[in-house]
Image (cartoon, rainbow, N blue to C red):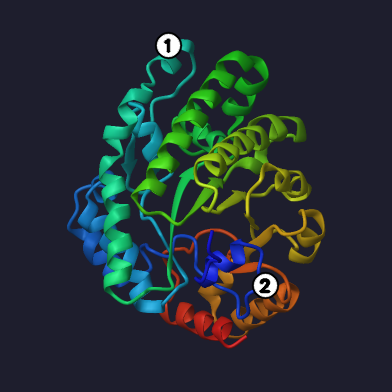
Amino acid sequence: MPEPTKPLLRALAGEAVWPPPMWLMRQAGRYLPEYRAVRAGVSDFITLCTTPDLAAEVTLQPIRRYGFDAAILFSDILILPWALGHGLAFKEGEGPVLPRLRDAAGLAALDPARVPEAVAPVMETVRRVRAGLAREGFSQTTLIGFAGAPFTVACYMVEGGGSRDFAATRAMAYADPALFGGLMDRLTEATIVYLSAQVEAGAEALMLFDSWAGVLSPSLFRTHVIAPATRIVTELRRRYPGVPVIGFPRLAGLMVGEYGSVGVNAIGMDTSMDLTRAAALVPDGVALQGNLDPMSLVAGGNALSDETDSILRAMKGRPFVFNLGHGIVPQTPTEHVAALVEQVRAA
């Protein structure tokens, strides 16, 4: 297998690329005026995610503006439960709203056979983005596909949407392990199918977002974060040995060391993690990704410059991908993003 040449793929292969490759979580989004223009012409968010020409356009927008080293598929982690036949709506000012899955009947209603056809528009988006990157001269930009990790997706399905602490989900994991384990199994298998389809359509790297991993105790973290991630990564590695996987177990804390055992090529660090400590915890050869505070990007100026310098100093000499510790927020000034890109490129 030839050595990767794209900066992001080189870092994910364990090379200490410098300056480090960079991209930003939620880099295609509401902070960009060109995104807002596209979104204004669409009736709802699911339509935007499942209309290939529009989803491909917004995926490419931040690449045209900033020249990031990765384009990440524009979609949502809840497209998978939607594809399984679970209801999903996005309400303005409220976020995602889903039926609450609380019993065996809800689990039985999930239909894996629906997934390939339901996500076909997403796969067309992947193909269009890959072609668009080549056509528009971004030959060194890596296309990242992604999915929500099973636990985080389960959180939204059990709670019926977002929550401060996902108490009902955690209670189900303890009180009804058969039901919750069945849901996790269904989501794990569907995630493998979904991510495999993205690779077949042209994704060059994959990312697994476990945004709510940090609400779990260590024992449940091992059962519902580490075990399914290991299963997913192992199967993807068997099918596509050359496609790297980034894991993002947000707020994992000290458990990030154990998460390093799942087989991912890189681990995304949330804003709270000390990068030097994380580097000592994860296995040798696993790249780190992160972890600038999105609020420093909003603030700009010396605050942004100092935080960025601190991260760059801590990570020089090891495999690293510069990113945020969570997604970019809508109030972020575009000129602050441009200043960040300039600073990282000049490292």
Q: Which residue is drawn at 23% across and 52% down?
A: 52
Other residues around mark 1 within 10 Å, as few (<14) / some (14–19) / many (≥20): few
Please give the residue where the numbered disc 1 appears in the rendered image.
Answer: 105
Q: Is residue 165 visible?
A: no
- Seen in the picture, residue 174 relative to 17 is either above or below; the reply is above
Would you say 23 lies left or right of 216 here?
left
- Seen in the picture, residue 128 relative to 7 is either above or below; the reply is above
Other residues around mark 2 within 10 Å, as few (<14) / some (14–19) / many (≥20): many
Q: Which mark is residue 61?
A: none
Q: Which mark is residue 16?
A: 2
Q: Residue furthest bottom?
A: 346
Q: Residue at x 58, y 41 (%)?
A: 233
The amino acid on which the numbered mark 1 sits, given as a three-letter code, is Ala
> Gap in Å between the C-alphas at discs 2 and 1?
50 Å
Q: x and y percent of residue 344 in the render?
A: 57, 81
Q: x and y percent of residue 49 in the render?
A: 29, 49
Would you say 298 lies left or right of 36 here?
right
Q: x and y percent of residue 283 in the render?
A: 77, 53
Which one is nearer the viewer's eye here, 128 or 44?
Answer: 128
Q: x and y percent of residue 268 in the render?
A: 62, 56
Q: Residue at x 47, y 77 (%)?
A: 337
Q: Can residue 25 be seen in this view?
A: yes
